[in-house]
Image (tube, helix red, strand yellow):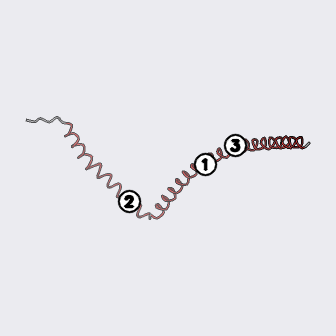
Amino acid sequence: AIASEHYQRQSDDAAQMTTQNRMLVNQVDELKVTAQLQRQELDSLKRANTELQAQVDTLRKRSDLAKALGSLRKDDLEALTRSSMGVAEAIKEQLMPALNEIKEDEMRPTTLG
């Protein structure tokens, strides 16, 4: 009778452990699925973060430009425009012809002798 109870208890324990093991395997499978979904969500959030950071950088640059332009007075802008146009004209009328002459001189065959 004692041996029979002992074997019965072992059988009951084994059945209970098998059930617990099955439940643990199912929980592990569920956790794997959850982990995969979270990795996918994390990847998506990383991509969205990268896109948002690029937008923030662009907006920051625009803001800095707007501040810089806002700090200039109309008189200063007009003076800068005239000055820039003057520099461009000087380059066109004086520097470019001189550079063209130098380039033409470099292309001419030299005679040593």
Disc 1 residue type (three-letter) = Ala
> Which residue matches tag 2?
80
On the image, the x and y values in percent for residue 96 come to: 27, 46
In which quadrant is the C terminus drawn? top left
Disc nearer the start of the sequence (1/2): 1
Disc 3 residue type (three-letter) = Lys
Disc nearer the start of the sequence (3/1): 3
On the image, the x and y values in percent for residue 38 come to: 67, 46
Observer-nearest of 2 and 99 = 2
Q: Which mark is residue 95?
A: none
Number of other residues with Cα within 10 Å of mark 3, as a class: few under 14, some 14 to 19, many 20 or more:
few
Observer-nearest of 30 and 24 = 24
In which quadrant is the N terminus drawn? top right
> Which residue matches tag 1?
48
Disc nearer the start of the sequence (3/2): 3
Disc 2 residue type (three-letter) = Leu
> Which residue matches tag 3?
32
Q: What is the secondary structure assignment of the residue under circle 1?
A: helix
